[in-house]
Image (cartoon, rainbow, N blue to C red):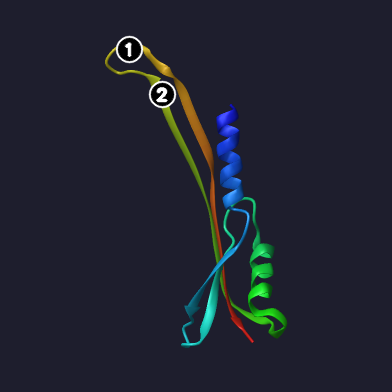
Amino acid sequence: MHRILSVVAFVAALQGCATSSEVFLADGSKGFNINCGGTAMNYGHCLEKAGEICGARGYLVVNQSGDAVPFSTASGGFDANTQAASGGYYAQSGMVVTRNLFIRCK
């Protein structure tokens, strides 16, 4: 149980801040793609990062995209060859959440 909590804490720490990368927008101007995906974040984190990048100049939101995709996995149960339990059953489910904000500094 302690090991599972450690892994969950580690993954949550990785998802703790928005990241950005410089991109060229469709019109050829320089912009930024800000990623604030994960279940612990929201578009507010993207907007905060945009403010850090552009500062007092401000920014324009060019586009935003996002998706939430559920997943589940399962393993264990019975061994087909011996018809005996193979050590238990393991199941996991959750959601992969992506959020991207494309901005241009003014």
> Which residue is most to the right?
56
The quadrant of the image that shows the N terminus is top right
Eye-nearest disc, 2 or 1: 2
Does 98 sit above or below residue 94? below
**Amino acid type assigned to the residue bearing label 1 in the image:** Gln
What residue is rendered at 52% in x and 38% in y?
A: 93
The quadrant of the image that shows the C terminus is bottom right
Does 96 sit above or below residue 99? above
Determine the secondary structure under disc 2: strand
Does 52 sit above or below residue 78? below
Does 76 sit above or below residue 105? above
Where, by quadrant of the figure, is residue 55 drawn?
Answer: bottom right
Where is residue 11 shown, x and y percent of the image?
56, 45
**Amino acid type assigned to the residue bearing label 2 in the image:** Gly
Mark 2 and mark 1: span between their CA atoms? 12 Å
- Does residue 31 appear to the left or right of 46 in the view shown? left
- Does residue 53 appear to the left or right of 22 in the view shown? right
Local packing at callout 1 (Cα closer than 10 Å; few below 14, some 14-19, many 20+) is few
Determine the secondary structure under disc 1: loop
Residue 31 bears which disc, if any?
Answer: none
What residue is rendered at 61% in x and 41% in y?
A: 9
Is 12 or 64 nearer to us in this picture? Answer: 12
Residue 83 bears which disc, if any?
Answer: 1
Where is residue 29 shown, x and y percent of the image?
50, 87
Q: Which residue is mark 2?
A: 76
Where is residue 41 shown, x and y percent of the image?
64, 56
- Does residue 60 appear to the left or right of 89 in the view shown? right
What residue is rendered at 46% in x and 23% in y?
A: 89
> Which residue is most to the left?
81
Where, by quadrant of the figure, is residue 105 drawn?
Answer: bottom right
